[in-house]
Amino acid sequence: MREFTCVFNLRFHELNLIKVPLNLLDLLEDRFRYFKTVLPDLLASPGSLLFILDGLDEFKYQLDWNAPDRDISLDSKVPVSELIVVLIKGSLLPESSVILTSRPSTDAPKWFFQCCCVVLGCEEDQVKEYTSKFYKDLKVSEKVYNYILDNDNLFVLSFIPLYCYIICTALAEFFSSQEDSDSRSLELNPPRTVSDVYYCYLFTAVKHHALKGKVERNTPRSEVLSLVMQQLTNLGRLAYGNLLKSKIMFDIQELERYGLTPVDIQSTLLSQILVPLKEERVEMFSFFHLTVQEHLAALYCAINLSKQGHIIQALDFWCFGEIPPPSTSPTPLLSQDLHLDQTRVENLQMFTRFLMGVLRTRLGGQLDGLVLAQWRWAWRGRISPPG
């Protein structure tokens, strides 16, 4: 086992904030200020250094893996995307070690790495243990675990600890130790797909946190959603607009442009984080998880796309980067100045899967309270009516 003197953890969603060329020393001094005085000594022995580059799929800049090698030193100022490439390829600090984490869909050349592996997460027994600790009530935890076990979609998802938390939160509305008629009726139709789980997770977060006791457990879903329609719409606009830009961190000014204020934002949807920028700390926000941003973006699109032709045109853009010709009627959410390169199209795969699931939810009438209000606006000429 190799021993390291120092491990540098660099998160791609934070690297997205860098807009000017810089060298590796500048980057490390900004991110690890307490190492400022010893960095030169550490970099003098690169064989004892480990760089963890976390979340490549969240990086908004395109990496040019085929760029010709250049003589880049510790003092060379280059774009952050180029700095990452030379660090991974070993053109800079070749004796150091690099671990890159990413979603499987990311197109990172495997020949730059000595080893590639898939992190499996929880084992079956650990999922069972997690549900028992999550629910406390043994009967409820057994019912939830058996339900997960019998559903292939949820069972595969549950191996990832964060997803296991989302599943348990979503299923809490459907499995209860209370033997009232409402709980029994809820048990008849619990979520079966990944999209269903996220929608139920969102609904649970809204019902129990955003509304702060304003509704009862048996309040109809449509009534709950109608109460937070504007907030969910604003969150969806924020999620969708920035997803197209591969942007997952937002400052207060951007939130306000989307009609959101930090005091109204619940920790279940956005988590407040501090990101070091130069000599000050800037208050930044991100969604609880990238998949939450993707699902909210899909929900926003499903609400605002009502015509079949518009849905097909939008899918052509999200899946293939194809913008409808100017001669066609304008499609909501799309414009001629939008552009998606191949990397960004690949990064929208989870979003488009969520969209298809949410459209199915809409057809089942489960978006009542969101969609119906939008359709009432449609007849007043604000958006295209359903076709």
Image (spheres, rainbow, N blue to C red):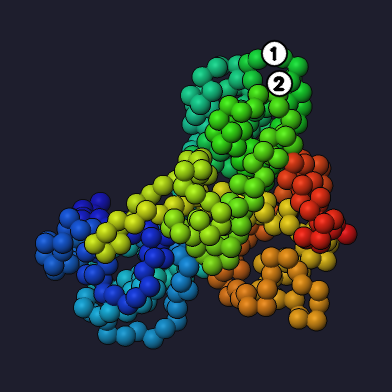
Locate residue 221 relative to residue 248 in the image: left or right: right
Residue 307 shows in this picture: yes
Residue 192, position as x, y percentages in the image: 71, 38
Question: Which amino acid type is marked by label 1?
Answer: Glu
Residues marked 1 and 2 touching at CB (< 8 Å): yes
Residue 268, position as x, y percentages in the image: 51, 40
Residue under label 1:
179
- Name the one closer to the observer, 39 or 159: 39
Locate residue 65 relative to residue 235 in the image: left or right: left
Q: Residues within 10 Å of mark 1 (few under 14, many from 20)?
A: few
Residue 120, position as x, y percentages in the image: 49, 45
Locate residue 316 relative to residue 264 in the image: left or right: right
Q: Residues within 10 Å of mark 2 (few under 14, many from 20)?
A: some
- Name the one closer to the observer, 328 or 173: 328
> What residue sits 70% from the left and 24% below the top?
218
- Kindly indicate the quadrant of the structure image that contains residue 386: bottom right
Label number found at residue 183: 2
Location of the C terminus by quadrant is bottom right
Locate residue 33 relative to residue 9 in the image: left or right: left
Q: Is residue 16 above or below residue 202?
A: below
Question: Which amino acid type is marked by label 2?
Answer: Ser
Residue 45, position as x, y percentages in the image: 15, 66
Counting every numbered tag in the picture gives: 2
> What residue sits 77% from the left and 72% below the top?
330
Q: Is residue 340 above or below residue 101?
A: below
Report helix, strand or loop for mark 1: loop
